[in-house]
Amino acid sequence: METIAGILSGVPLFDGLDESRLELIAGCGSNCGFDVDEYLFREGEPAATFFLIRRGDVALELFAPPRGAVTIETLQAGEVVGWSWLFAPYTWHFDARAVSPVRAVAFDGGCLRGKCGDDPALGYDLMSRFAQVMIERLQMTRLRLLDVYGNGG
Amino acid sequence: MATAAELSPMTPAPFRVVSRRRETSDTFTFELEPAGGAAVRPRPGQFTMLYVLGVGEVPISFSGVTDGPLVHTVRAVGAVTEAICALEPGGVLGVRGPFGNCWPIEEAAGGDVVVVAGGIGLAPLRPVLQHALANRSRYGDVVLDYGGRTPQDLLFREELAQLGRRTDLQVDVTVDTAAGDWRGRVGVVPKLVADARFDPAAATAFVCGPEIMMRFTVEALLERGVAPERIHLSMERNMQCGLGHCGHCQLGPTLICRDGPVYRYDELEPLLEVREL
Amino acid sequence: MIGPSALDDLVGGLSERGYRVVGPTVRDGAIVYDDLETAAELPVGVTEVQEAATYRLEQRDDDARFGFAVGPHSWKQFLLPARVRLWRAKRTGDGFDVTEEEPPDRPLALLGVRACELHAIEIQDRVLVGGRYVDHDYASRRDGMFIVAVNCFEPGGTCFCVSMDTGPRVREGFDLALTEILDGEHRFLVEVGSERGAELLAALERRPATAGDLACADAAVTGAAERMGRRLDVEDIRDLLVRTREHERWDDVASRCLTCGNCTQVCPTCFCTSVEDVSDLTGETAERVRLWDSCFSVEYSHIHGGSIRPGARSRYRQWLTHKFGTWIDQFGSSGCVGCGRCITWCPVGIDVTEELAALRESEG
């Protein structure tokens, strides 16, 4: 059975990290799974854990009355769900729901923040990697803001 | 009496609506047959000028290969397209054409075919897919990446569902937003391209949609390693005649009605870089 | 050689042969093209004074019939009329019936076509009948058209046909070509360009040309070539316009250009048209009308969602780069014949030769 460090080494987010760092991070992680329609976390809950999807699809949702739950983005295998664990007040800003059976690695945010505190260089490296993800997601969100398929264009 | 061959290319031929299918709240697919005259058989990528008596004329891409009727998918966004979309079976339209050049599907033979569509852009690409599937052994991987505004705005939904069940075709669909009951992807089309399974070195891409969507899709294709001369886009400008006589559809040194609407990306790129060209 | 009085017989002869004769005449302070019944209607002893944003007529001190260059009209108003119905349609039980417009009842005879204008007609021929599709209306007016060309001896203040290699001497494409000689006896050298030209000439009072006549005619035209109002370096101009697409000069001209479209209206090669579909109140009959259009209007480049060229900068750039650059890619020749009308009739005096020179100079 593959170790968590082994799983991490094949994922774009951690691409290029050396073995010892991968082991460090893996130390904060554990395998988990979610059934269809099970929530990984909900808006307002403490952002204690974040997830790396190994298999399956996760929908990020916001509950917007009267529309109900609106899916703002879906994430697939190899992608990380959540970065609110990085910044105080460490609270989730949206819901995350499995839309197909999900296998994931759950990371203890507090554990990882502690290790970054001990090793600032690791902290900087991780922060850079997460920033890259945020930039990509922001760009895609901006594109959707343009509503290119709407009536104006 | 003038025969059809002597008629001016500005004179429409009457066609009748044989069937009308609602795709979304503002988009319909029509099957048309000539009211007495010759059939019109566009090739994939071409368009005809559709006319509603006394209202006006618009260029609409041909959207389906059949052995008989002429197929067009029309979105109601202005006076003429609204009038077209209001037609029921038996209703009458004028048709001129077909005009323009075609998607170079034959060039893709022996390699992978990547079809990337946004919104109504799926309509002009549907004949490409139909051709590839009808001649499946000529091609390697065949991919359809399609994006729309919401699940309700997706075209050809039944057909997409059927295509999705085929094992010889990859179909990936995404929408900009969705309600909670949508089980598919929410995100942008370029991301579908990044995740699609094909060999960039042997792939030909056919792209159609809003210009900005095409721009970012091309970026994603180039990032995957698809050669610029094997990426083909369909461009749009104001069109009044379709004959190369009215001047409106100019795009730099080309006329879209004559040298397009399908362009090779490496030839198009310098023109796309100039804003308001 | 013919004398001035033979021009009446020329006009009469064309009418008798069933042509609709059109040519220059004075109206509203300008020399325009209109129907002519006699040669007396020509602008006898009149000349034009032209500069950027300037046009006026002046009396000459002779009786020259063609002592001017070109006015605000061009022959395109007859070949590509500003407004023309293409067809009418009537709803029927299972569709509609279309009745195309009949061609004009008489072929045209153009009297006084300059060399630049002959080129302009040829340029429009390439666009409208030389491509994959033939414009039926244009072709029907062009068919059988009789051309009496005129060699210029009095160039206009904004002329640059020499730079565009379109004049002042006419080369081909005419039935008859006249060169007016005022040196000594007032007379015209007539060159024959076709059989029907020869046939018409045979009906006029004439005498053979002498060596002296030929020399005078040549001097008149050569003199015109030496007195061009403008010059333009066309070397590599197509690529120059590609290289300078984002030049700041476009902002400069945009600050002056009113996008009034006068230039496109007076230009003898501008061919853009739009189409209007109208019906009666019952919706049972409809017609399609073709109208002149101009790339200077905002609607010209409108597609669903907005106009591709919303501002003056991109619209002026489109016009100029098309005329001198991309026209070559699209139709195989320049779109400009150097007639200078756009300079004369621009209300703010924008001079295409100056704009192009500025772009060229900026490259160093």
Image (cartoon, helix red, strand yellow):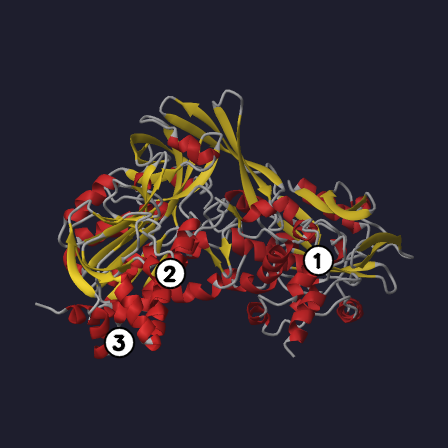
Quick check: marks 2 and 3 in contact, CB under 8 Å?
no
Check the residue under mark 1 and report the chain it is in: C
- For image coordinates 23% across by 42% down, the residue present is B66
Which residue matches tag 2? A87
Left or right: residue B255 compared with residue C44: left
Question: Residue C64 location in percent, x, y?
Answer: 84, 56
**Residue A70's quadrant in the figure?**
top left
Residue B38 figure quarter: top left
Pointer 1 with pointer 2, Cβ within 8 A: no
Tell me if residue A29 comes above or below residue C277 in the rendering. below
In this view of the protein, which residue sits in the foreground, C150 or C1? C150
Rendered view: C300 above or below C342: above
Which amino acid, mark 1? Ser
- For mark 2, does the 10 Å Cα neighbourhood hold few (<14), some (14 to 19), or many (20 or more) residues? few
Q: How many marks?
A: 3
Q: Position of residue A72 (x, y in %)?
A: 34, 48
Mark 2 or 3, closer to the camera: 2
Q: Which residue is mark 3?
A: A17
Q: Residues within 10 Å of mark 3 (few under 14, many from 20)?
A: some
Q: Specify the subunit that label 2 lies on.
A: A
Whether residue C132 can be seen here: no
Classify residue A118 as left or right of residue B56: left
- Mark 3 or mark 2, which is nearer the start of the sequence? 3
Quadrant where the image shows the C terminus of chain C:
bottom right
